[in-house]
Amino acid sequence: MRFRFVEEHRANFPANFPANRLCDVVGVSARVLRAFRRRPAGRRQRSDMVTLAHIKEQSRLGLDSYGRPRLTEELKEIGLDVGHRRVGRLMRHNGISVVWTREGWLYLAVILDLHSRRVIGWAVSNRMKRDLATRALRMAIAFRQPPKGCIHHTDRGSQY
């Protein structure tokens, strides 16, 4: 997990900032990081990438209001061998949270303060649209009033 953090956040630092120093801060060995970079993706990781690409494609086709069960059925219809737990995990890990309420399934976008791990912005909607993430971010900005140059890390999902 720490290796992925270093890889994903390396671009946020100046070009002359050594990767070794970032490794020291995170607490990993630079040698082990280089070995991690060379290691090919595992079978599950490759399969998850394919499934996630199909999930994003279904969202692009206008099926973005589908929850985990319907999306699982759609993926099975196009020939993918997936279960609802796996689809739910991929949706959740990629910023797509679906919550059951008295009104039915709702989509939830949350902005966390990485330092305190507190929720500082959120938005709920019955449809997964790009403005859902934007509304959550606006709430976080209004709540915290961050200084200029503050960074918003995302999972790079389609709605962000």
Image (tube, helix red, strand yellow):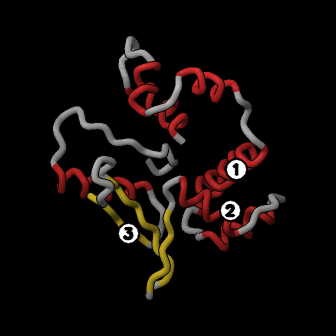
The answer for how far apart the CA atoms under marks 2 and 3 are is: 23 Å
* Residues packed near mark 1 inside 10 Å, few (<14), some (14 to 19) or many (20 plus): some
Q: Where is residue 64 drawn, in percent x and y?
A: 56, 62
Q: Element under label 3?
A: strand
Distance CA(mark 1)–CA(mark 2): 9 Å
The residue beneath circle 1 is 48
Q: Amino acid at mark 3?
A: Val
Task: Find numbered disc 1 in the image and state the secondary structure of the residue it sits on.
Answer: helix
Evaluate if marks 1 and 2 touch, with contact meaning CB atoms under 8 Å apart: yes
Residue at 43% of width from left, 47% of height from top? 160
Amino acid tagged 2: Arg
Which residue, given by chain and number where applicable, does mark 3 sit on? 124
- Residue 123 x/y as whole percent: 34, 65
Q: Position of residue 118 (x, y in %)?
A: 29, 58
Q: Where residue 117 appears, x then y in whole percent? A: 33, 55
Q: Please say if 52 is above or below 21.
A: below
Q: In this figure, which residue is indicated by the disc labeled 2?
A: 86
**Residue 137: in sight, yes or no?**
no
Task: Please tell me which of labels 2 and 3 falls first in the chain.
Answer: 2
Q: Which-is-in-front pick, marks 3 and 1?
A: 1
Instruction: Indicate whether 116 appears above or below 5.
Output: below
| Labels 2, 3: front one | 2
- Residue drawn 54% across the image and 42% down it: 1
Residue drawn at (80%, 58%) of the image: 80
The foreground one among 20 and 114 is 20
Of pointers 1 and 2, the one earlier in the residue sequence: 1
Q: CA distance from mark 3 to mark 1?
A: 26 Å
